Image (spheres, helix red, strand yellow):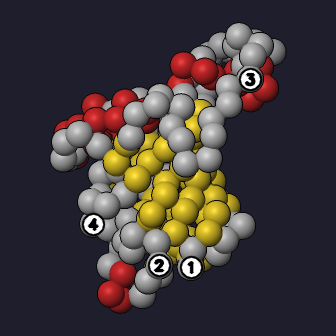
Amino acid sequence: MALPFGPPLRSFAEVASPLGKPVFVAADADATGTEHHGPRAGTHLDFKVLTKDTQAGFFLIEHRNVPQGGPVRHLHYAQEEWFYLIEGNKVLIEVGDERFMLRPGDSILAPRNVPHVWAYIGEKPGRMLMGFTPAGQMEDFFTLSGKQPVDAKIAEAHGMKWLGPPLDVSKL
């Protein structure tokens, strides 16, 4: 279907396999074969679905060894961000002016242009999936954030706006 304001809509299935071939990534492995670390110290990211494998339609990471706390409050100008808690205690997430508590097996979608922030709560590290659609600059952002500190200017260059501090887990 052609829309007056953009390209035709395509299903995720059409976008996810441009070459018509599956892309397998084993447990505890990264699709790039490279180890990635998140913006916060001690975090580990496995890139599971790469931007190039979906014609920039989707990017998925597995966040392993998630420590207490989380990122700054932010929004994505052009991406929805999806969260799924695989294991661990719980994740407090605020999307817009609503607050949710994710437990293992729960998921939530944060719409584009809506401020959101999350914090993992638990003494033992957790594990979660985070997906971005369309992929935008998120793969580049997480690649860069594992190599150097990132700030609001770098976030802005990758399609995000930082809006405030992380959630204070000491008050939760």
Q: Which residue is mark 4?
A: 165
The residue under label 2 is which amino acid type? Answer: Lys
Q: Residue at x 23, y 39 (%)?
A: 147
- Give the alpha-carbon distance from disc 1 to disc 3, as whole Å: 33 Å
Q: Which residue is mark 2?
A: 124
- Tell me if 41 is positioned left or right of 70 in this view: left
Name the one closer to the observer, 139 or 155: 139
Image depth: mark 1 or mark 3 in front: 3
Name the one closer to the observer, 150 or 126: 126
Q: Which residue is mark 3?
A: 22
Image depth: mark 1 or mark 2 in front: 2
User: Where's the C terminus, which quadrant?
Assistant: bottom left
Q: Quadrant of residue 166?
A: bottom left
- Give the alpha-carbon distance from disc 2 to disc 4, as whole Å: 23 Å
Q: Residue at x 34, y 48 (%)?
A: 37
Q: Is residue 128 above or below residue 87?
A: above
- Badges 1 and 2: C-beta atoms under 8 Å apart? yes
Instruction: Determine the secondary structure under disc 3.
Output: loop
Q: Is residue 17 above or below residue 170?
A: above
Between discs 3 and 4, the one toward the N terminus: 3
Instruction: Determine the secondary structure under disc 4.
Output: loop
- Give the alpha-carbon distance from disc 4 to disc 1, as whole Å: 22 Å
Is residue 144 visible from the viewing direction of this image? yes
Count the numbered circles shown: 4
Instruction: Determine the secondary structure under disc 1.
Output: loop
- Give the alpha-carbon distance from disc 3 to disc 2, as whole Å: 34 Å
- Give the alpha-carbon distance from disc 3 to disc 4, as whole Å: 40 Å
Between discs 1 and 2, the one toward the N terminus: 1
